[in-house]
Amino acid sequence: MSSRYAAGIVPAMIKRIGAALLILPASLWAVSPDTIQLKENAGITGRILAEKSDQVVVDVGYTALVIPRNQVVRILKGSAKSGSPTKPSAPSASRPAEEGIYYTAAALPPLRDVREQVRQIGEAVVQVRTPSGFGSGFIIHEEGYLITNFHVIEGDTQISVELFSQKGAQLERQVFKQVRIVALNKFADLALLKIEDPQAVKFVRVPLGDSDALSVGDRVFAVGSPLGLERTVTEGILSTKTRQIQGDLYLQTTAPINPGNSGGPLFNLRGEVVGVTNMKITFGEGLGFAIPVETVKYFLRHRDAFAYDKENPNNPYRYLEPPRRLRHAEAQP
């Protein structure tokens, strides 16, 4: 395994900065401190002096530290206050950090058992059906955007989405047949769909987590429709987070994955999606795989480049028109 996948050694990699940086204006301390959450459940509280693509510089009062970006899980910014410095308050897990059509929790949600997590997020997991078969998916936006695998809908445009809503003590099945393909990435095996049924209301959604922050042995669980058995929950651990298959890295898990689970979410015990289940070893048990959620985020952030083109449905990429000024320049003799 390449050394870049070795376990992080945060303390040895954090560097001190010269004493000159410690001479700070008094007004800087009139704000609440920032919290930098690191891997391996570590953290640093201080004032961020600079944020770069490869490092974060933090003043901790008696010195300043340089923290490599690859060791940072989340940065929680303090809010401006008047008067003397105050202690940071506990972050709120209920305030989402919006990232376009998906969101991440503004602070680490609390750990809960699988039963409690499923009760809260079960409505966001759906079954995706086409004339060729079916798979699973999960809603990432209240307007009906959802993620599934490319191979679940490959070659089909007639798509329906089935979900279950909690109505008192009963579950109510809903089927939506007006589903649009928004973007496809054949090579990452990802598809972005949108439910456009005029009768649809706001959907329950799930937050995307951080697959880089996972550790081998962490407990995870999958929700999906294996062999058509909707709302099936399976639990296991993360076996490895860097399993290389045909040049791509996957999360490997002992949570049972079967046909029909494809496109469904793999959750951590904080209720965050950390992967998209998409395959298993046929002649083996406890050998399931999921696309890391960081790959999903990249796909969503760059969805315009993967936009579905009705005129060329087999092409997962859409080539954008050049800017008008460049077109005029190219047209000059």
Image (cartoon, helix red, strand yellow):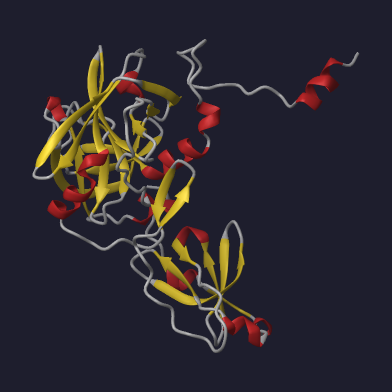
Q: Answer above or below: position of 90 versus 75.
A: below
Residue found at the very far front of the displayed protein: 199
For this rendering, which residue is in front, 10 or 55? 55
Residue 147 visible from this viewpoint = yes
Left or right: residue 79 compared with residue 170 = right
Residue at x 30%, y 22% (from the top left corner) = 152
Can you tell which quarter of the image residue 279 is in? top left
Q: Answer above or below: position of 101 versus 323.
A: below
Left or right: residue 284 compared with residue 301 = left
Instruction: Point out residue 17 in the picture as x, y percentages from the top left corner.
Output: 61, 78
Residue at x 36%, y 12% (from the top left corner) = 155
For this rendering, which residue is in front, 195 or 262? 195
Left or right: residue 63 compared with residue 1 = right
Residue found at the very far left of the displayed protein: 169
Can you tell which quarter of the image residue 286 is in? top left
Residue 191 visible from this viewpoint = no
Instruction: Point out residue 333 in the picture as x, y percentages from the top left corner.
Output: 91, 13
Residue at x 34%, y 39% (from the top left corner) = 202
For this rendering, which residue is in front, 104 or 80? 80
Can you tell which quarter of the image residue 130 is in? top left
Residue at x 78%, y 21% (from the top left corner) = 327
